[in-house]
Image (spheres, rainbow, N blue to C red):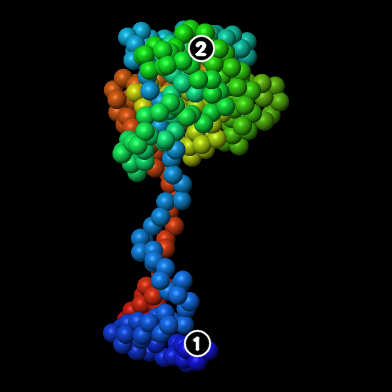
Amino acid sequence: MNTWLTLLLLAPNLSALPVGHCRLGVDATMSSLTHVLPSSQSEAPVQTTSSARLLKPTTLPIPLLSSPVAKRYSYAHTVLVPVYYYLRSSALVADPLPTMVTDLLVIGTAQALFCSVCLPSAGSWVSGTTGGKIVEGTAAVKSPRTTKSPTGTGSMRKKFGPNKMGDGAGGSWVSRVMPALFSLILTLTLPPLPLTLMALVLGAPLYPTSLLPHTLLLALHVSLLGFLPIFYTHGVSSSAWRDVAAAWLPFEESGVWGGTVGAMVGGWIGAVPMALDWDREWQKWPCTVVWGVVLGWTVGRVLTGMLRMGVGRRINLSEREETDGMVTEQLTHCEKKSD
């Protein structure tokens, strides 16, 4: 009790002292406190780092299957999808609603085929960080401790036999097509509603209400292009989708995350021509946004899947908290007073 009374009496006088005397006074005060605190607290280590990461990634890059067919089809798929949308552009401008419905069938089939041929399904590869610690700012794993069977955290955890894993072919056709169909169902049911609400918040037209189906179809196209491969490779893993929500999946040579980021950014940029007063038919909702999504998806896949730019890197949106101690704050206050 006497020590605390001494602190209260000395506190008003510390600000009037020079910097050197103030520093000595703070040190003496803190040294007196160490005798009052219990031994368990006085002996506890003091955190001296200036920042600490609050959110850490838990996912590894989505690999591209090593078979020659997978690599060739991955390149062909990157080209065929934008070519198809280009060939359908006049029909999209003339009658958007039925055109987008028809295109859903084609793009959904193409994306499911891409997943089946080029990517490992959820549960057939190690999608988490069980192999070691992730190097900060990258997707590289260091000091792995074990190479046991995969322990993916998704719900689609069917483990294929050893002869069907790690052979570069991704297992039998049945083991690849069935997850693709299941992922297609998830893609068409879960992301479209949040994507539709996001589009409305960002300025998609609410009136006339006849345009709402167009917005929903736009969300379905974005979902197929951006999220079907993620459902196929990660299932409904909570840790993986947390990294998706944090925009923290690593870019990989398969071009999955690059295509997703490109589609989202491209759709946002694609809305810009609609505001121009050119009075062109192709400026109506949602033609330019669809084309922006496709162009962004293509650019993202070309940069990461073909040119290998940014492979293994993550978008760093981590939050950090300052952990400066009380003594530092008091010293800063004393220096300001002396000035």
Rendered position, 24 above or below 304: below
Residue identified by numbered label 1: 4
Q: Position of residue 330 (x, y in %)?
A: 40, 77
Q: Earlier in the sequence, mark 1 or mark 2?
A: 1
Q: Secondary structure at mark 1?
A: helix
Q: Which mark is residue 123?
A: none
Cβ atoms under marks 1 and 2 closer than 8 Å: no
Residue 21 shown left or right of residue 86 in the figure? left
Q: Is residue 220 visible?
A: no
Return the residue at label 2.
175
Nearer the viewer's eye, disc 1 or disc 2? 2
Q: Image point 64% across, 28% down: which residue? A: 193
Comparing 132 with 163, the one in front is 163
Please state the horizontal and vertical placement of residue 60, each as a whole percent of the image: 40, 32
Which element carries disc 2, helix, strand or loop? helix
Number of residues whose C-alpha sits closer than 10 Å to that of mark 1, classed few (under 14), some (14–19) or many (20 or more): few
Residue at 42% across, 51% down: 53
Separation of disc 1 and disc 2 at Cα?
70 Å
Res 49 quadrant in image:
bottom left
